[in-house]
Structures are given as structure tokens and as C-alpha cells.
Image (cartoon, helix red, strand yellow):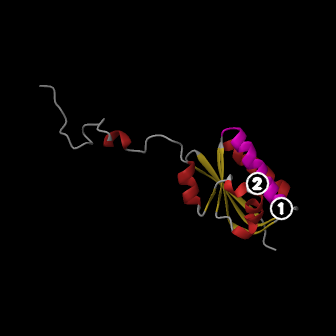
Amino acid sequence: MAELRFSMESHGASVVVSVHGELDIVSSQRFDDYLSEAAARSDRVILDMSGVDFMDTTALAVIVGHWRRQVAADGLFLLAGARYRYVKALWITGLADRLPMYDTVDEALAAARPPGPEPGAEAANGRDARMSGEPEATAG
């Protein structure tokens, strides 16, 4: 059995939690604690499940619990890289239609990006004359 490993990395306003190994009843409390730590860091949590080799229903219950808490607190909880065989129960129960799932972490990060202007948007809107191609006006 592969050793279970967690990692946490901040990406702007989001935190990405990566899991590698097997999530089961033995590891569910550690998993729950780690997700709680992530939620304390950010209201935008992305769970990268691409390295999960096995997951049972206790781990699924931990995921659903954290998703519900984040949503209730006006936050986001997104899954990335989850294989169908591990989240099949979400589809059967209809939760898959409500719990946001993405193929990759990059897609989830894009979806979790806070609304607002993109970097450089002010220049594109012409608020900065030097960036819009107009010569800088000089006082004569």
C-alpha cells in the first residue's frame, strides 16, 4: 500500500490540496483535519484528486462535508482530477451535478478566480494613456 501524502499550496486567493495514495476509513480523520486546515487558510479550496489510488465512502463523506461547509460560508470547494470510479457515488446521488468538478487543477483555478478586472485591464480600457498607444500629454 502506498503511503498517503498530502500537500497544500496557495495559488492567489485559492488553496490547492493535493492527495496522493489511498483515502479510506483509516486515513479519514487525517484527511478531514487537512481539509479543515485548508479551509482556515482560504475560502476557495481546490482538492486535487489526480493522485488518489483508492477512495472509500468515508473519504467521500469527508469531501461532501467540507464542500457543504464551504458553500454555507459563501466559499468554494472544487474537485480536480477525480476519477469517475472514485466519485461514482456522487453521480448516483445527484451530488455530482452540484459539487463542482474539473478535469485539471488549472481549470479549477480558473473557475475559482475571484471576479474582477484581469491584470492589465485598466490599460486595455484606456485609463492609462501611455499604455493605450496615445502619446503622453505634456504641460506646455
Residue 63: assigned label = 2
Extent of the magenta region:
58-74
Give the image quarter of residue 106: bottom right
- Of helix, strand and loop, which one carries label 1? helix
Q: Quadrant of the N terminus?
A: bottom right
Q: Quadrant of the C terminus?
A: top left
Q: Position of residue 25 (x, y in %)?
A: 87, 61
Give the image quarter of residue 81: bottom right
- Number of labels in the image equals 2
What amino acid does circle 2 point to? Ile
Residues 5 and 52: in front is: 52
Residue 57: assigned label = 1
Q: Is residue 71 magenta?
A: yes
Above or below, comparing residue 6 to residue 54 in the picture:
above
Above or below, comparing residue 55 to residue 70 in the picture:
below
Whole-angstrom CA distance, mark 2 to mark 1, is 10 Å
